[in-house]
Image: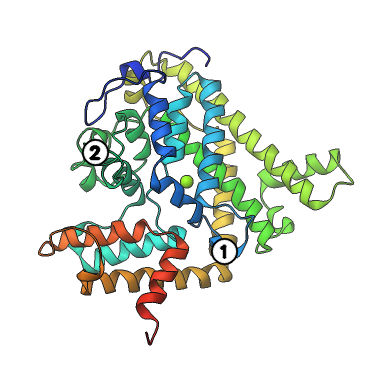
């Protein structure tokens, strides 16, 4: 690995784990975190959780698992270019969606709505917080503690956003939301790698599904510029290959721009330690013109893909499934094979949310069928 910059996280200077453990022998602390994430149950479940398209709609569409791997790939490139820790950024990227519900954002929004309406005192459902909960509490792989006992730096990166109410309850990883400081550069870059990955693969999946077209995408500057370049270079290539070339070129443009802009901010603020960097304004950023183009792309995807009536139809079914399951478990606590205090509505709601959030798309569909199918 190339030399680390002064503002990089150093595994030997980690702020530590919640339960002290001896240092690993043949790996650094962040490698160990990455390895623990890859071996955990929630990571394997990502294979059957929706990104935009339901898992069974087609074998070529992204799932949360392939999405997380693409984020890790982009994040590692950024880390290497900017002298921050590749193993840490990979751990953050691979873990960032562990708390995602079945059925993508629809499932998450509905679970949040159920929590807020039916058990307002439980404080809603936030998928970022849930990812942290998976690695801090829900994984059951160690004899002497709950969760994976990851380093502070990995946990800090997983918790991208958080409400102030929850931040105050979280201790060390919540502090930055209260103090208004930033996360490490590894965490900041992993967050933007996520955005680069989903904007581009959603174009790819959207085109494959036929819900959006190349003609529509031509209204976007970032797509049109790259498409024109690629078509000039390969005038006879079939559309499938042109699209792959365009997406590759767009990812490259975004990664290079992010690297350059971040480098410039680092030059200006010159943080000489990770703590100095945490006290600076955000260091990871796109240039203004590219930020504007990326925002236009996001808006396009929202208007034309995520809100396409075929996607919305599928999502309204998904919402129905999540709400039915939540209500049923709330009314019939004996259906849930989980230990919690049934006289405490907050604990009960949290146990139900944990259970539903842990479901894959197909498991949620099957569970719904099993509970609501008429007859025996
Ligand atoms: Mg993501």
Tell me where residue 230 appears, x and y as whole percent. Answer: 79, 41
Q: Which label number is shown at residue 143?
A: 2
Kindly tell me whether mark 2's CB lies below 8 Å from ligand 1.
no
For label 1, the SS is: helix
Relative horizontal placement of residue 172, taking residue 111 as reference (left or right) = left
> Residue at the location (29% across, 29% down)?
152
Residue 221: x and y, percent? 67, 46
- In the picture, residue 179 is in which quadrant? top left
Q: Is residue 218 above or below residue 265?
A: below
Q: Residues within 10 Å of mark 1 (few under 14, many from 20)?
A: few
Front residue of 41 and 187: 41
Q: Is residue 284 above or below residue 356?
A: above
At x 31%, y 21%, the residue is: 14
Q: Earlier in the sequence, mark 1 or mark 2?
A: 1
Visible residue check, residue 97: no
Residue tagged by mark 1? Answer: 56
The label on residue 32 is none
The x and y percentages for residue 347 are 17, 58
Furthest residue to the bottom? 375
Cα separation, mark 1 vs mark 2, equals 36 Å
User: In which quadrant of the rendered image does the C terminus lie?
Assistant: bottom left
Horizontal side of 72 relative to 217 (left or right) equals left
């Amino acid at each position: 690995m190339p030399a680390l910059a002064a503002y990089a996280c150093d595994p030997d200077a980690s702020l530590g784990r919640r339960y002290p453990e001896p240092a690993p022998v043949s790996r650094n602390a962040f490698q160990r975190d990455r390895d623990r994430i890859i071996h955990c149950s929630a990571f394997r479940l990502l294979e059957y959780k929706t990104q935009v398209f339901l898992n069974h709609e087609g074998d070529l569409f992204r799932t949360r698992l392939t999405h997380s791997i693409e984020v890790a790939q982009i994040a590692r490139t950024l880390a290497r270019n900017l002298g921050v820790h590749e193993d840490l950024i990979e751990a953050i990227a691979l873990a960032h969606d562990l708390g995602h519900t079945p059925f993508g954002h629809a499932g998450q929004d509905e679970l949040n709505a159920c929590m807020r309406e039916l058990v307002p005192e439980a404080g809603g459902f936030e998928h970022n917080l849930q990812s942290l909960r998976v690695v801090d509490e829900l994984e059951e792989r160690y004899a002497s503690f709950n969760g994976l006992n990851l380093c502070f730096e990995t946990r800090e990166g997983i918790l991208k956003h958080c409400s102030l109410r929850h931040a105050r309850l979280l201790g060390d990883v919540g502090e930055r939301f209260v103090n208004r400081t930033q996360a490490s550069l590894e965490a900041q870059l992993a967050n933007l790698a996520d955005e680069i990955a989903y904007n581009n693969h959603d174009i790819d999946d959207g085109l494959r599904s036929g819900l959006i077209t190349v003609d529509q995408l031509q209204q976007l500057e970032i797509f049109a510029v790259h498409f024109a370049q690629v078509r000039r270079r390969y005038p006879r290539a079939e559309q499938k290959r042109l699209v792959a070339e365009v997406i590759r070129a767009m990812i490259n443009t975004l990664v290079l721009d992010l690297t350059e802009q971040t480098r410039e901010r680092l030059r200006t603020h010159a943080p000489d330690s990770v703590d100095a960097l945490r006290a600076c304004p955000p260091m990871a950023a796109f240039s203004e013109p590219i930020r504007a183009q990326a925002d236009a792309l996001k808006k396009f995807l929202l208007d034309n893909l995520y809100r396409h009536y075929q996607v919305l139809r599928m999502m309204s079914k998904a919402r129905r499934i999540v709400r039915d399951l939540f209500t049923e478990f709330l009314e019939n606590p004996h259906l849930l094979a989980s230990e919690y205090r049934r006289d405490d509505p907050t604990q009960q709601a949290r146990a139900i949310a944990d259970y539903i959030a842990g479901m894959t798309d197909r498991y949620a569909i099957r569970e719904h069928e099993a509970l609501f199918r008429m007859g025996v």
